[in-house]
Amino acid sequence: MNKIAIIGANEYQRRLIRKAIEMKLEVHVFSWLHDRKHINSDISFHEVDVRMIDKILSICKSVDIDGVCSISSDLTNITVNYICNKLSLPSNPPNVLRLTTNKYLMREELLNNNAPVPLFSSNKDNINFNFPMIVKPTDRSGSRGVTKVTSKSDLSEAIKRSSQESFSNEIIIEEYIEGREYSVESFTLDGKHNILQVTEKFTTNAPNFIERGHLSPARINTEIKEKIFNVIKKSLNILGIITGPAHSEIRINNQGDIKIIEIASRIGGDFIGSDLVINSTGIDYLQLEIKRSLSINIDKSELQQKSLNNIMSYFFFSNEDQLNFNNIRHIVKLIDYKIINKPKLKVTDSSHRFGYAVFEVNTSDIELVIKKLNLDKN
Ligand SMILES: Nc1ncnc2c1ncn2[C@@H]1O[C@H](COP(=O)(O)OP(=O)(O)OP(=O)(O)O)[C@@H](O)[C@H]1O
Ligand SMILES: [Mg+2]
């Protein structure tokens, strides 16, 4: 039986764990103890901080692991990449991880190779662009420490907030890019970048841009789609991605100009990689990733779109959001719904969202649902 190691056990990683169990693999989960209670199936649970890479490596060696994978987190992606490289298991070279988990290095590499990125600087005394600007940590996710700054007087405070959130105290200041937001899910196999889906993203907008919901597939025409595919494939090449999933975030303005916000060399979180892709396209993204990690042969047909459904995710920040969802519940087909904890008074990053719904929408109802859920405020 193939032995798979899954790093982390958050909401999205638990979906990967369930998929591995469904595939009848021997599953080893590495995570903090408090995650254990969420996984009640027959797996081997190893209580460990996911950043303790050498401890995890040594357990993987001792159980003679065949593959290592994760989803949704840069932190666990770093661990996966480290172990895979040490054990000669399928993975990208370490430099890919360096570039895709540091927003500054990523920008530099993309800019040097003529990919479309915002102007940027690591230092407030060396800025060659105008307000508004975005200040963010180089190494965090979930919109932690991200602020839109519109005047010089607010810049220092935003930098302070960002550095405090940053693991390394490093920040990046960027030109603010106008436009709608999308993410692109891809899967690279045998050197070929396969684009699985383009997803539209709805956020709280300024100042913190926390994700409120998504729609797969995005409402874009074929011409824009082709443009996106070209930019993403070129950027994946620049970053050196030779295998596996990527989650690329972009903005497109009214003139159709694309700018890259960031690219992660892993499956995206927020239900995009785990729920939206499979329910909208029929492509089993999690299974693909598990198979690839284990070097199990993947047939071309597994990468082909089998269906075309409109799938949305919607996150509850307040009781009002939950009520709004209840009001449209009768016109959508529910896939998943969960209340995780009590609403927080102040939401400053995505960990403060208190519940969610994932659902299918008829094409003719998309505009109405987006309006009723107050998603389209851009
Ligand atoms: N240069 C920019 N111009 C305009 N908006 C930006 C820019 N950089 C970031 N944003 C906005 O802030 C959001 C979060 O930024 P980014 O993705 O870089 O941080 P993150 O912490 O990794 O967030 P997440 O994990 O939610 O993707 C983006 O999705 C986008 O809405
Ligand atoms: Mg992001």
Image (spheres, helix red, strand yellow):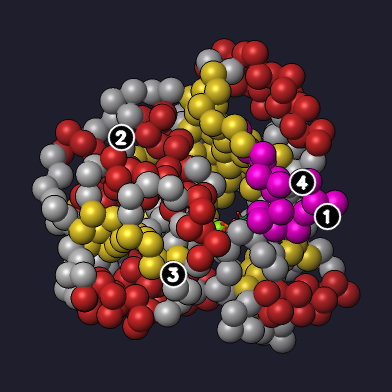
Q: CA distance from mark 1 to mark 4?
A: 12 Å
Query: Is there any visible trace of residue 241 in the rendered image?
Result: yes
Q: Which residue is mark 2?
A: 283
Task: Please give left or right for residue 141 compared with residue 105 in the image.
Answer: right
Task: Please give left or right for residue 162 compared with residue 296 in the image.
Answer: right
Q: Is residue 275 magenta?
A: no
Q: Which residues are magenta?
A: 339-357
Q: Amino acid at mark 1?
A: Lys
Query: Callout 2: few (<14), some (14-19), or many (20+) C-alpha neighbours within 10 Å?
Result: many
Label 4 SS: loop
Judged from this view, the residue extending furthest toward the right is: 153
Q: Nearer the viewer, residue 209 or 339?
A: 339
Q: Amino acid at mark 3?
A: Glu
Q: Which residue is mark 3?
A: 47
The structure residue drawn at horizontal position 71% and vertical position 79%, both measured from the top left corner, is 164
Q: Is residue 354 magenta?
A: yes
Q: Which residue is mark 4?
A: 342
Measured along the vertical axis of the image, is residue 329 above or below residue 260? above
| Label whose residue precedes the other's in the sequence (2 or 4) | 2
Nearer the viewer's eye, disc 2 or disc 4? 4
The structure residue drawn at horizontal position 66% and vertical position 56%, both measured from the top left corner, is 351
Q: CA distance from mark 3 to mark 4?
A: 27 Å
Label 1 SS: loop
Magenta: main secondary structure: loop
Task: Please give left or right for residue 229 compared with residue 294 in the image.
Answer: right
Disc assigned to residue 346: 1
Nearer the viewer's eye, disc 1 or disc 3? 3
Label 2 SS: loop
Q: Position of residue 324 (x, y in %)?
A: 76, 26
